[in-house]
Amino acid sequence: MPFLETIRNVLVQARVNARELLPPPIHRIPVELLEEIFFNYLNIHRKKSYDWLSGLYVSSECTTNPLVFGHICRHWRIVALSMPRLWASLAICEPKPYMVPMARTWLERAANCPLSLYMAVNINPTITESVTANTLLSLFISHFRQWKQIDFNLTRHQQKSRDKVWRSISCSPDLRRVSWDSWYMHHKVPNHIRWALLTHVKMAPGPDSLTPDAFLEILRSCQLLVDLDLDVRIPDDPTEYLNRLILPALTSIDITQYSTSSRPGIVYLQDLFSRSSCRLRRVLLADSGIEEHQIVHFLCSPHVQAVDDLYIRSKAITNTTVSFLTSDSTNAQRVLPDLKKLSLYSCDVTASALSEMIATRVPILETFNTD
């Protein structure tokens, strides 16, 4: 039987050779599937609010990064390095000098992908951390044309760094929405802002950084503006601002006042609406110093009759206002005929008055909120 024994040995050796030539199962996973595995791995490792430690991560919500794949095997490292999208997001917390070359390599691996960048600095950073943060910002700014989303949490002492970032952002021809806090605009409004391109602006300038003339000049430059959120201290009588405005396309207005001074409430807006010939669709009114007759007079204005979303928070509201809002089927000139959403808070009204008002407004009235 030597011949059969020889044949068996040959077959066994052939099987062993075949196994040695065949790559292990983990290496036979298609690259496209391996890519999805990598991305899902990064997304499931979410951080808790107290887990945020100094380091480099794939996002501000993650506790890992793509570097881990290179520690598994040579094949995984090759695959990870060949996937620019895997490196297109970078989050850095408490910058350290060793992170600078790592971040530079990270962004090189991202190639031309749109970038999402996050960096957080301690409230009271050391000199080393501040210098490192400025170096990283310069690195990020060198890739600003690839920015898709950025979130840089800097301290109030890093004004120059903040201004450097905003100057880069202002260069983008695609910039449409901006939000500036009071730290950035505490002393002055930057002169590099391209107001003509902006459609949505939110800013909180310091008490002496924006004069009425400067404010009006900004508005004059914002030809595409559709949403303005301005947090600024103005005199008790804001007519110095409003008397020089004409807003024909105004459809939504939020009025929030907490002062109980002798200012004329919302009455001063009547001239603005008449001068602008606008038709409002949404009104939010929260005023602790307004009187009920002023609210009723405001709701009588022809410029608010197209409003379909009304929010009022005022202790001045009683059954008188609710009765005024109660529709009378025999009255063709009823107030706010298109009202779909109504919210009344902090008011002194009875449940029966509210029920009667709601009953006369359904089915047009779809939502009612109160406290």
Image (spheres, grey):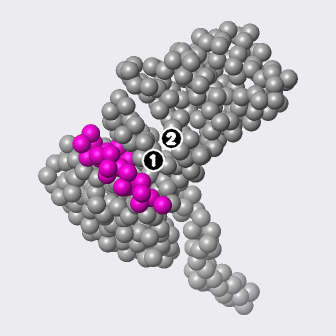
Q: Residue at x 38, y 64 (%)?
A: 194
Q: Percent position (x, y) of residue 334?
A: 76, 28
Q: Percent position (x, y) of residue 149?
A: 45, 60
Q: Residue at x 26, y 46 (%)?
A: 209
Contact (CB < 8 A) between labels 1 and 2?
yes
Q: How many marks?
A: 2
Does the rendering let one see residue 371?
Answer: yes
Q: Was residue 293 drawn as part of the magenta stretch in this picture?
A: no
Q: Secondary structure at mark 2?
A: helix
Residue 328 vertical position relative to residue 177 in the rendered view, above or below: above
For the residue marked with disc 1, what is the amino acid? Leu
Is residue 128 shown left or right of residue 343? left
Alpha-carbon neighbours of circle 1 within 10 Å: few (<14), some, or many (≥20)? some
Residue 246 vertical position relative to residue 79 in the rendered view, above or below: above
Residue, disc 2: 272
Q: Residue at x 76, y 15 (%)?
A: 355
Disc 1 from disc 2: Cα separation: 7 Å
For the residue marked with disc 2, what is the amino acid? Leu
Q: Secondary structure at mark 1?
A: loop
Q: Residue at x 37, y 20 (%)?
A: 261
Camera-nearest residue between 7 and 364 = 364
Magenta stretch, residue numbers: 203-223
Is residue 253 shown left or right of residue 229? right
Residue, disc 1: 245
Is residue 248 shown left or right of residue 230? right
